[in-house]
Image: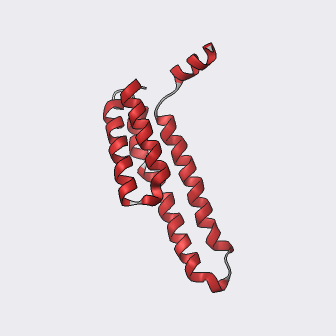
Amino acid sequence: MKRIGNWFRRFRSWYIILTGMIIQFLLGCIIFIIPSITTYKHAMSGLVGLFMGFITILGVFFGVIPLLLLAFKKTRKIGSLVSIIFGIISYIVFPLWIIISIFMVIAGIIALWKGI
């Protein structure tokens, strides 16, 4: 039980955003690769999949600002607010960014609540 407590003390809220960014990037790569294995007669659906994968990968770059703000102790409060706001806005504007949006909101709430 003591090991879990020690691990949680070292846990930081920006780890959550980083995890969300990795998952979002992998999902974008999968969506990005699927059009390359389609046949020629499905070229238009492949093009749509290509754009969807590209937009999904762009969601990773949207999480960099809250990640950097939460990583430093002096900017953690503003970073938590920015993380929550960016998470809500990114879900409204691009529903494909749902993974990074959820992880940003969770990280922002944990940073405000626990201060980590």
Figure quadrant of the N terminus: top right
Q: Percent position (x, y) of residue 91?
A: 40, 54
Q: Is residue 61 above or below residue 18?
A: below
Q: Is residue 28 above or below residue 51?
A: above
* Residue occupying the point 45% across, 46% down: 102
Q: Where, by quadrant of the figure, is residue 30 drawn? A: bottom right
Q: Is residue 115 visible?
A: no
Q: Where, by quadrant of the figure, is residue 110 drawn? A: top left
Q: Is residue 4 above or below residue 36?
A: above
Q: In the displayed image of the protein, which residue is found farthest to the top?
A: 2
Q: Percent position (x, y) of residue 89?
A: 34, 52
* Residue occupying the point 57% across, 49% down: 23
Q: Is residue 21 visible?
A: yes
Q: Is 74 or 42 nearer to us in this picture?
A: 42
Q: How is the image coloured?
A: secondary structure
Q: In the displayed image of the protein, which residue is found farthest to the bottom?
A: 41
From the viewer's perspective, is 23 left or right of 87? right
Figure quadrant of the C terminus: top left
Q: Is 1 or 52 nearer to us in this picture?
A: 1
Q: Where, by quadrant of the figure, is residue 43 drawn? A: bottom right
Counting the numbered discs, the total is 0
* Residue occupying the point 41% across, 60% down: 94
* Residue occupying the point 58% across, 21% down: 7
Q: Percent position (x, y) of residue 98?
A: 46, 53
From the viewer's perspective, is 13 left or right of 85? right
From the viewer's perspective, is 19 left or right of 93? right
Q: Is residue 115 above or below residue 93?
A: above
Q: Percent position (x, y) of residue 53?
A: 54, 64
